[in-house]
Image: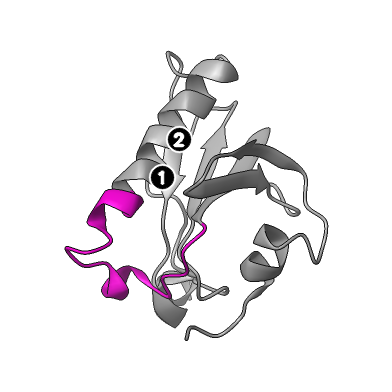
Amino acid sequence: MAEETIFTKIINRDIPADIIYEDDKALAFKDINPQAPFHCLIIPKQPIATANDINEDNAGLVGHLYVVAAKLAAEHNFSQDGYRLVMNCNEYGGQTVYHIHLHMLAGKQMGWPPYTDKKKEA
């Protein structure tokens, strides 16, 4: 059995979250530390620890997260302007909760690259 995370507690309603979407496979809620005017997390209800754990058996579930993202973009009227979807993997990828999740960011122009490597600037 996968280790319980803060996301498991949100799914089970053990802790509160500002839930904006739910179906039998996925849940979306607003990020508590938003990095854009619209920033939510889209998670599968079935725990998958990292992107490295995505396989043929759960690929459809992961694809469903992107379907949810498209629905949310249409519902919140930013599908035409655009948005960013990010899934971090492990420590160097910036993952802090080991239950995969899509960060959905919208409502402003996104730059690329998304950050500057401070080590290269020194």
Q: Residue at horizontal 78%, vertical 52%?
A: 17
- In the depicted structure, whether residue 19 falls above or below residue 32: above
Q: Amino acid at mark 2?
A: Val
Do the residues bearing badges 1 and 2 touch, measured as CB atoms within 8 Å? yes
Residue at the front extreme, as displayed: 24
SS label for mark 2: helix
Q: Nearer the viewer, residue 115 or 68?
A: 68
Q: Nearer the viewer, residue 106 or 68?
A: 68
The x, y position of residue 1, in whole percent, is 47, 86
Residue 96 image-quadrant placement: bottom right
On the picture, is 51 further left or further right than 17? left
On the picture, is 23 further left or further right than 19? left
- Please name the residue that numbered disc 1 is placed on: 65
Bin the neighbour count of mark 2 within 10 Å (Cα to Cα): few under 14, some 14-19, many 20 and up: many
Q: Nearer the viewer, residue 112 or 2?
A: 2
The x, y position of residue 119, in whole percent, is 45, 77
- In the depicted structure, whether residue 104 falls above or below residue 94: above
Q: Which mark is residue 116?
A: none
- Please name the residue that numbered disc 2 is placed on: 68
The x, y position of residue 22, in whole percent, is 60, 40
**CA separation in Å, label 1 and label 2:** 5 Å
Q: Main secondary structure of the magenta part?
A: loop
Q: Nearer the viewer, residue 53 or 94?
A: 53
SS label for mark 1: helix
Residue 70 image-quadrant placement: top left
On the picture, is 109 further left or further right than 48? right
- In the depicted structure, whether residue 30 falls above or below residue 37: below
Q: Amino acid at mark 1?
A: Leu
- Can residue 40 be seen here? yes
Q: Residue at horizontal 51%, vertical 45%?
A: 24
- Can residue 36 be seen here? no
Q: Residue at horizontal 34%, vertical 52%?
A: 61
